[in-house]
Amino acid sequence: MKKKIAVLVEDLYQELEVWYPALRFREAGHDVVLVGTGAKDEYKSKVGYPAKVDTSIDKISAKDFDAVIVPGGYAPDILRRYPKINEFVRDMDKAGKIVGAICHAGWVLVSAGILNGRTGTSFFAIKDDMTAAGMTWIDKEVVVDKNLVTSRKPDDLPAFCREILNLLAN
């Protein structure tokens, strides 16, 4: 069954962490929507690769999506500054919908306030942020805690996407 997946983007995103999931989920037949903060229509990755968004966060609602993917890079530090981004991620989690976060994306999860009592992983440099927000941190390629799927780095993308696809199939 076709599902609708939001992939959040902002400047300085990590290229593989946006495009690998977006293309893999499209290949699996899902509807992938690139969602920006509303600051502009196109965002540049850490190396300048453009991502033209389909819509902005102020035009969407958690009720319209089955999953959200938060990529890493430095983009999460920008994404988390937008209350509507944090609200969207929090609403997705409250509804039991899939929340996927890789690398530095955990910063958005911290700001969304959804980590207390959860188990997950992230890039090691933000482990302290994750644990201070109440999460039990594990150094593992992918950790699934109910609807929350977390991974550490681009090398973990195959496992990250596999687990999200497994949840989408249920």
Image (cartoon, grey):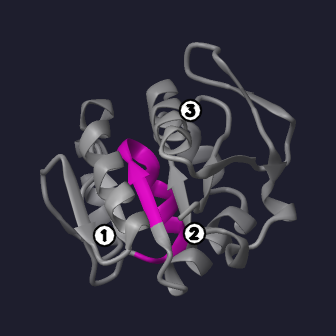
Q: Residues within 10 Å of mark 3 (few under 14, many from 20)?
A: many
Where 113 falls versus 104 (above or below)? below
**Label 1 vs label 2: CA separation?**
28 Å
State yes or no: residue 108 in magenta.
yes
Nearer-the-camera pick, 102 or 32: 32
Residue carrying label 3:
13
Residue range corresponding to the magenta coloring: 99-114
**According to the image, label 1 marks what residue?**
132
> Where on the picture, by quarter, is residue 92?
bottom right
Q: Main secondary structure of the magenta part?
A: helix
Q: Nearer the viewer, residue 13 or 31?
A: 31
Could one spot residue 129 in this view of the protein?
no
**How far separated are the C-alphas under marks 2 and 3?**
22 Å
Q: Residue at x 70, y 79 (%)?
A: 63
The residue carrying mark 2 is: 66
Picture layout, residue 56 above or below residue 40: below
